[in-house]
Amino acid sequence: MTLTKNTEILRAEVAAHIKADALVRGSYWRPNMNAVGGQGCFISCLTHSSDPTPAFERFGLPVAVLRIAENIFEALPVAEGRAFFAALPDAVGRDGKDLSRVHWGFLAAELRALPQTTDAAQAVIDPVIDGMDLLFSGQQWPDADARAAAYAAYAASAARAAAYAADAAASAAAHAADTRLRQRDTLLALIAAA
């Protein structure tokens, strides 16, 4: 387990990258002559590369959490993405926090946020949520239960995807911004509560 560390350095570096207007979507680190030596995405501004591992090693930020944050950041409007990046150090808050299970809590929250579905599909989703809740709380998800839930979820996903395809296309644009803001808030809350 790696705990958060160097939180004050994280706070200073995030502030410096925001002040230098170094945060951009859609691009890993590109050197230039600004105050921080370049521009890049969420991960890149923490690592000056495309690899999230240095942020894990330096700050104790798990790669899974960084990948989720990057995905959310890339879909947010520019100002919201900048605010999300700026909020990270405050959510981390201090050295010594264990963020290694945050991604399980986030994934369980995402499954809970899915649109209403059939009882049969929900019967497949619920055991996956239960398993992720176990992992988030630091408990074990027995292999047999995990495999059975994963198989059932996989089998149901094709049917569910086809059923939602038409509706999703029509409503995706309308709900995308709200979804990403909810995801941002969920991830920051989970990090803060860890």
Image (cartoon, grey):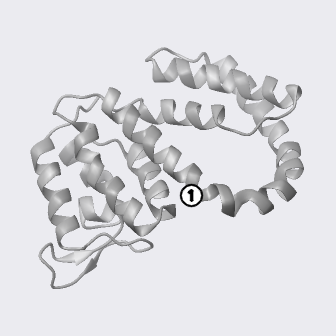
The quadrant of the rendering that contains the N terminus is top left
Q: Is residue 13 left or right of residue 145?
A: left
Q: Is residue 47 above or below residue 97?
A: below
Question: Could you say whether the residue bearing mark 1 is in a helix, strand or loop?
Answer: helix
In percent of width and height, residue 88 lies at 29, 47
136 or 143, nearer to the observer:
136
The image quarter containing residue 59 is top left
Badge 1: few (under 14), some or many (20 or more) residues near its Cα, within 10 Å?
some
| Observer-nearest of 164 and 1 | 164
The residue lying toward the viewer, choosing from 34 and 176, is 176
Query: On the image, which quarter does residue 45 sit in?
Result: bottom left
One can see residue 194 in this view: no
In the image, what residue occupies the spot 58% across and 50% down?
179
Residue at 10% over, 45% down: 8
Tell me the kind of residue under disc 1.
Ala
Number of on-image labels: 1
**Residue 68: x, y in percent?**
46, 49
- Report the quarter where the C terminus lies: top left
Location of mark 1 (residue): 177
User: What percent of the width, then of the height, locates residue 40?
Assistant: 32, 71
Taking the spot 63% from the left edge, 25% from the top edge, the residue there is 129
